[in-house]
Image (spheres, helix red, strand yellow):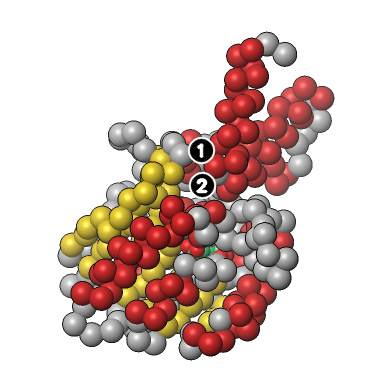
């Protein structure tokens, strides 16, 4: 093997180590390459639409149940923990700045806010914010994950619910947290979700993994899945077309470098 190829393979190795969430996308590229060289058609699930093409709407429930069952975001070192929402939900480098920034916002409020945590995942992050809020509802589309959270976090007085942000009605709360959820959805799903989120709270705290290093084309489409738009240098920005969220004000609560991108948390306030 020639040296340039070895360098590329080393770079891919590093990319997957730093971003296990990109593994399915890299596997799909490899499968397409194998199919081209062997003359086989890749399995249907691996025929991703062209980058930025409109994506078919699929049930988030089925997609994310499979993501957890197959460990697409990695696995916990603790064999007692069957669900793992990824490095972004566990590494201190990502979790601590987020908890500090959101904690500062919550603590500055004159009253304790009621909170809705949408796509709460394994609740490693949400469990840190819970003590700073009044009533706390945490929901996710994966039924088995919510059943597990109900037991593991029973001491935290959280109303855990199975809820699909795209298909179900949202309960109202003072503040809604949506952390690294929208980045996994298709544009059609995000558009439906964004309208509901804006109508269900006064403050919306949204965290997204975005490309770093200057301008990028926001909101290129992709199907719902473990992967994110970073792979084709795009990312979800709710205030850009086609979503056009129009909050009364917006501010960056925190931003953490993450590989070739940044994990940015926005606070949107609605009138
Ligand atoms: C990467 S995890 C992030 C978990 C958590 N917010 C955190 O930051 O640790 C994304 C979560 O969003 C959930 N999710 C995806 N689509 C959803 C939907 N339509 N409704 C509710 N939850 C959804 C997934 O099941 C998964 O648990």
Q: Residue at x 41, y 40 (%)?
A: 261
Q: Which residue is mark 2?
A: 228
- The answer to whether residue 201 is visible is no
Which of the 4 image quarters holds residue 244?
Answer: bottom left
Q: Residue at x 49, y 85 (%)?
A: 156
Query: Which residue occupies the foreground of this view, 203 or 32?
Result: 203
Q: Is residue 53 left or right of residue 2?
A: left
Quarter of the image that includes the C terminus: bottom left
Q: Residue at x 40, y 74 (%)?
A: 129
Which of the 4 image quarters holds residue 12?
Answer: top right
- The answer to whether residue 77 is visible is yes
Q: Is residue 164 left or right of residue 238?
A: right
SS category of the residue bearing label 1: helix
SS category of the residue bearing label 2: loop
Which of the 4 image quarters holds residue 150?
Answer: bottom right
Q: Which residue is mark 1?
A: 231
Q: Is residue 79 left or right of residue 232?
A: right
Question: Is the residue under label 2 in contact with that under label 1 (CB below 8 Å)?
Answer: yes
Q: Where does residue 169 sit, x and y in percent of width and height?
A: 45, 78
């Amino acid at each position: 093997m020639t040296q340039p190829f070895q360098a590329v393979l080393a770079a891919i190795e590093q990319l997957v180590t730093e971003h296990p969430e990109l593994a399915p996308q890299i596997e799909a590229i490899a499968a397409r390459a194998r199919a081209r060289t062997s003359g086989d058609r890749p399995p249907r699930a691996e025929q991703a639409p062209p980058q930025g093409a409109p994506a078919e709407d699929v049930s988030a429930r089925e997609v994310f149940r499979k993501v957890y069952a197959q460990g697409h975001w990695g696995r916990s070192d603790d064999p007692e923990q069957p669900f793992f929402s990824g490095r972004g939900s566990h590494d201190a480098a990502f979790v601590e700045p987020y908890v500090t920034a959101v904690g500062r916002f919550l603590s500055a409020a004159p009253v304790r806010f009621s909170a809705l945590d949408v796509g709460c995942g394994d609740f490693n992050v949400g469990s840190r914010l819970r003590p700073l809020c009044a009533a706390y509802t945490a929901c996710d589309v994966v039924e088995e994950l919510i059943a597990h959270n109900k037991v593991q976090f029973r001491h935290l007085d959280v109303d855990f619910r199975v809820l699909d942000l795209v298909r179900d009605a949202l309960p109202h709360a003072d503040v809604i947290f949506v952390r690294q959820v929208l980045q996994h959805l298709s544009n059609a799903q995000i558009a439906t979700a964004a309208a509901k989120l804006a109508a269900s709270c006064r403050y919306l705290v949204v965290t997204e993994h975005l490309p770093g290093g200057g301008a990028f084309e926001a909101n290129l489409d992709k199907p719902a899945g473990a992967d994110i738009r970073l792979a084709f240098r795009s990312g979800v920005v709710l205030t850009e077309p086609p979503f056009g969220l129009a909050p009364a004000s917006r501010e960056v609560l925190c931003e953490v470098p993450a590989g070739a991108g940044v994990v940015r948390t926005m606070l949107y306030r609605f009138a």
